[in-house]
Each structure stands twice: as structure tokens, then as C-alpha cells.
Image (spheres, helix red, strand yellow):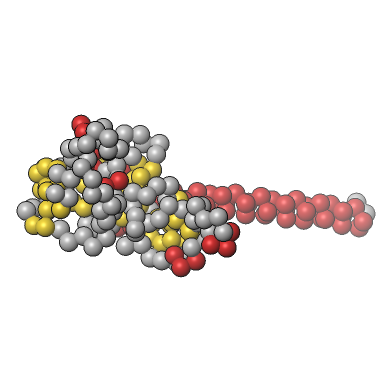
Amino acid sequence: MSEKNIRVAQDKRTKKSVAWEYVEAIIIAIILAFIIRKFVIQAYKIPSGSMLETLQIGDHILVNKFIYYLKDPQRGDIIVFKYPKDKKRDFIKRLVALPGETIEIRDKKVYINGILLDEPYAVFNDSENIFNKNHPAYYIDLYARNRDNFGPKVIPEDSYFMMGDNRDYSQDSRYWGFLDQELIEGKALIIYWSWNGSQTNLLKKVRWDRIGDIIH
């Protein structure tokens, strides 16, 4: 084989080697991205106002999916989980009561083991009588009897009681029951982007003051 032919063969092998390195790098990147998304960090968008004022509609958040491999969920954690009634949907609520605790709600106030829970994050925007047939919440869960008064009930093992911060307008454990630990996906960590779709002024659509906020 001539020197020219040898160089051509070497060049072909080099090109194939470089091409395979690119393919290998892409495959590794895809695998790492899948692992990170599945087990470490995942992005979510807030679609509803059930967590107002803590989380706004249009907030984009990062969720720590690894933390609960290291420790158990704590009261006050804001958690993303699979909705027990439809596991294809993701919900986000605040953890209010832990396994073994007794929860009771009396006139919108939450009591854990008979002690009033301090909840500076909770908001109540509805002063109307929900037992009025014209009220939008009237037909929720047997005429919304559980919204303002609930329990007392003991939280089962490996289960949690979840509530939205926007207490008068949140579909949470008062309506669909306790959250099984296996449905938990992770803890809300930080707001990385916030978009106010209701704003007509393009410059005001981005909520710059919320970007980078730690969620608690």
C-alpha cells in the first residue's frame, strides 16, 4: 500500500473516531439529563392560584427530587406530588400534618394534636357563606363541608395532610384525602422564571423581582 493510501485510510479512521466521539458524547448527555430530571432536579410551572401568595400563576420553579432520599418530609415543606385521583397530573401543596398526628380544622384554623398551628403563609380571600347554593364552592365534596371545618382525623402511617396556602380556593387533602408518601416527587426549591400572562404590557410580563426567590 502506498503512503498516500495509508494516509487516506488513517484520515477515514480519524473521521470515524471523531464522529463516534460526538455520538458518544450526545448519548451520555441524554442519559445524564434523564437521570438528573428523574432523580435530582426537575422544572415545573405553576398553573393555578391554589398556592397564592407564596406561588403565583406563571411561576416556573425547580424541584429537588433527591432530598427525600436523605430525609423525611417536614411540616411546612412545599411539595410536588402526583395527584392521588389522577396520577398523570402533578399537584403542589404545603405539608401541614405528619404521620401519626391528629389534624382538626375549626373555622378555618388548623390544629395539630389540639394545638393551634401558626401559619403566616395562609391566606383567606373568601368571606362568603359557602353553604349558599350560589357559592362556587357549594358543590365541592358534599357541599364543601370540609373546607372550613374538618376532622379531627389521625394521619395514617407513611401519609401526609397537604393544603394550599390559598385556603379558600385549593383542592387539597380536605377533599381528596391523605397523600401517600410514594406519590411525592420532590420539594419546591427556587423560582427560576416568572411570567405574568395577564399583563398586556410586554415589559411587565416578566416578574423580575421573583426570579431567584427561594421557596419556603
Residue 141 % position (x, y): 23, 33
Q: Nearer the viewer, residue 175 or 96?
A: 175
Residue 11 placement: quadrant: bottom right
Spot occupied by residue 205 in the image (x, y as percentages of width and height) = 53, 59
* Of residues 74 and 18, the one drawn nearer to the viewer in this rendering: 74
Q: Residue at x 27, y 56 (%)?
A: 123
Q: Residue at x 43, y 52 (%)?
A: 57
In the rendered image, the vertical position of residue 25 relative to residue 182, given as above or below: below
Q: Is residue 166 left or right of residue 38?
A: left
Which residue occupies 57% across, 63% down?
203
Residue at 25% x, 57% y: name it.
122
> Can residue 71 be seen in this snapshot?
no
Of 52 and 23, the residue lying toward us: 52
In the rendered image, residue 202, in percent from the top left (x then y), is placed at: 58, 59
Q: Quarter holding the C terminus?
A: bottom left
Residue 110, above or below 179: below
- Compare residues 38 and 205 and report the one nearer the observer: 205
Q: Is residue 42 above or below residue 182?
A: below
Does residue 208 show up? yes
Q: Is residue 22 above or below residue 212?
A: above
Q: Residue 132: horizontal and vertical position, in percent?
A: 22, 36
Picture mark count: 0
In the rendered structure, the answer to whether residue 87 lies left or right of residue 145 reads right
